[in-house]
Amino acid sequence: LRRTRAEALKKASKDEKRREELRAIAAELASRGARPPRATAFVEGTAVPVGAKVVHLIRHGEAEHNRAIIELSSRGLSRESLEADPAFVDPPLTDAGRAGAAALSKELRGLRVPPEVIIVSPMRRALETAVIAAGSPLLCPIVALEEARERFGRHTFDRRSSISELRRDYDPVDFSSIHSDEDSLWT
């Protein structure tokens, strides 16, 4: 855990340095009267060009399979047994994952340019992150898209639940763009 925390702090420091670099570049371009390119990197605290769309990419919080993989690795065991375990089909968030999503909710509500819509994978871990992060009342609509999935694979944790089950569990999410109740993309 210490190593992971140290790595996270090091990454956060690098991320902050990169944000500072991007702010400096944006300020330099603005001072020259340069128009931003059609696709730009947006850094909170910089000006958003008129008509531009701001896209925030957010990974789901820690899910049960993530924690199990870490535990297996710490004991020197392979994750292969977990990859086929039916107990890990479409796993939910852990308590830590839910706490992270709640913290994200506060961050989203504090953004200068709040989200207009949340596009989310129909995986339980992503849906749970999105619903918690969108808060109550919802910050914005939440739309599930099959194409937003990270992987379509052989691992049980890459197989989603049925849409009818997910609709029941995640009522605020719009699933109308997903036409197959069962996971036709899992192999």
Image (spheres, rainbow, N blue to C red):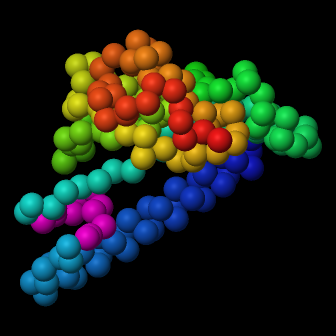
Left or right position of 3 against 134: right
Please name the residue shown 55% across and 41% down the image: 185
Left or right position of 183 against 35: right
Q: Position of residue 61 (x, y in %)?
A: 53, 35
Please name the residue shown 12% across and 65% down the image: 49
Q: Is residue 12 magenta?
A: no
Quadrant of the image containing the C terminus: top right
> Which stretch is magenta?
39-49
Q: Position of residue 8 (x, y in %)?
A: 61, 51
Quadrant of the image containing the N terminus: top right
Q: Is residue 44 magenta?
A: yes
Q: Position of residue 62 (x, y in %)?
A: 59, 34
Task: Give the image quarter of residue 169.
Answer: top left
Can the viewer see residue 105 in this picture?
no
Task: Give the image quarter of residue 29.
Answer: bottom left
Q: Position of residue 177 (x, y in %)?
A: 31, 35
Task: Give the image quarter of residue 103.
Answer: top left
Please name the predominant secondary structure of the magenta segment in the image: loop
Left or right position of 144 against 68: left
Left or right position of 185 against 85: left
* Residue that sits furthest to the right in the current view: 76
Residue 98 or residue 147, whichever sits in front: 147
Residue 61 or residue 124, whichever sits in front: 124
Please name the residue shown 38% across and 65% down the image: 19
Please name the residue shown 57% across and 47% down the image: 151
| Rendered position, 8 above or below 80 | below
